[in-house]
Amino acid sequence: MGDRASAGSLAASDPAFSAATTPAGPRAVLGLHEAIAIIVGIVIGAGIFKAPALVAGMTGSAPWMFGAWLLGGLISLIGALCYAELATAYPHAGGDYHFLRRAFGRPLSLVFAWARFSVITTGSIALLGFVFGDYLASVLPLTALTPGWNSAVYAAAAVAVLTWANLRGIKTSSGAQVLLTAVEVGGLLLIVIAGLFLIGDGSLTPRAPEAASAGAPSLSGFGLAMVFVLLTYGGWNEAAYISAELRDQRRNMVRALVLSILIITLLYLLVAWAYWQGLGIAGMAASNAIAADLLTRAFGPAGGTVISILVAIAALTSMNATMIVGARTNYACGQDWPLLARLGEWDAERNTPAVALRVQGIAALLLIALGGFVGGGFRAMVEFTSPVFWLFFLLSGIALFVLRRREPHTPRPFSVPLYPLLPAIFCAVCAYMLWSSLSYVYSQSLGGLNAAWIGVAVLAIGALLVVFMRPPLPSAQPAASAQQS
């Protein structure tokens, strides 16, 4: 009885203890293969079916194109090593939210949580829903609806079904993720097979001479190509949100991140090779639907239908993985702020943040309804908030330096090799991506306003939340001191 009371007292004063060890918080139930499926599923979205055409046009030759994709994998690996240190030293369902809170305090972490809820995660779920709906509607149109609402209906159905699967528990949602990721990877391998098929039937010759004749791209051209490459690699950092639910997390977190990046890099290089063999650099650069063009050339008109199904599956895979990790930020935020306490409730039986998942699903459905009314403007609105994402990504990298200095005695089961060089490279890349995204957004407009104001508005609303949110409950004060010490 005394031990139970002591444990309850400690859990009440230390949310990290509660989240890791009591039935009311996350439990370590995920295996290595499930973690890899979540990471790979988040990263490999619809981008790999479009970005290679843009990268080919900006690099202009095969060596530079493959170099860009390889460099993207290397940069992602460096970032993954940084996150492996943070996630193993500070395992928590809040992921980046938790790192930012420890390094910079509650106000900044709340602004991040708001940005993640309003745009970064929920907006991404809605946007992926529309990608899923667009491609599925091209195969199975809903004739009773106007074309503009076909995508919205399919998107809403996908959000509803996947939210239901996540509410059934982490084992159900992670099991679905493993299956969806396997199908998605199979689809990418089909593209590789199409490239091999075109070589095998004798209709193609190797493209190396064509590539060798091209000169090096300009520095700005290669830099812009890297923007699209890194966007296609984006999402591996979400592994931090399952750190508290990963079995043997001190070893498996590093393995999951490294193996996932290696798998993704290999797949991207193989897919880029298939596009190159089937279409050549010039054909890739001129293509508006590069995967469809390759499969149609290899397998005839049926190839276009196949690629629509593959892109729909890729979007669905990323949606499910984003839902798994996205709700965990809201859960962590709910544990810190009294007005959001309901978000901090954990379904111990199913090992999932049930309330946070429901709120996330409802918000995504509302955004889909908004998107149905405003059309392409909604997609632009989400895309124009990319500087917000890169800002907080940069701050997470800086948090590694801050926490190393502030908490030198914290056990670090994994330390970034070549510190501080590799974390500095990662932060420099994030800063460059922030600058690039700001430059792009500043040149765009939406509804007659400069698009840069969209990101400013998101951050401003988050700042207002900090001002009007009540201070933490007294019972949380010791935890705050412990977290900041």
Image (spheres, helix red, strand yellow):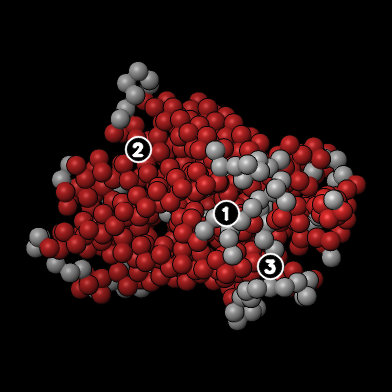
In three-dimensional space, the C-alpha distance between marks 2 and 1, rounded to whole angstroms, equals 34 Å
SS for dot 2:
helix
Cα distance between the residues tagged 2 and 3: 42 Å
Which comes sooner in the sequence, label 2 or label 3?
3
Residue 128 location (% of width, % of height): 46, 41
Q: Mark 1 packing: few (<14 Cα in 10 Å), some, or many (20+)?
A: some
Categorize mark 3 by other alpha carbons within 10 Å: few (<14), some (14-19), many (20+): some
- Give the x, y percent position of residue 376: 46, 35
The answer to which image quadrant residue 195 occupies is bottom left
Does residue 376 lie above or below 423 as drawn?
above
Tell us which disc is closer to us: 2 or 3.
Answer: 3
Residue position for label 3 = 89
- In space, the residues marked 3 and 1 are separated at their CA atoms by 19 Å
Pointer 2 residue: 135
Tag 1 secondary structure: loop
Of tags 2 and 1, which is closer to the observer? 1
Identity of the residue drawn at 61% across and 56% down: 28
Crowd band around label 2 with a 10 angstrom C-alpha radius: few (<14), some (14–19), many (20+): many
Q: Nearer the viewer, residue 284 or 163?
A: 163
Looking at the picture, how far across and down is residue 319, in whole percent?
48, 43
Name the residue at 54% across, 38% down. Answer: 168
Marking on residue 29: 1
Name the amino acid type tagged 1: Val
Q: Amino acid at mark 3?
A: Ala
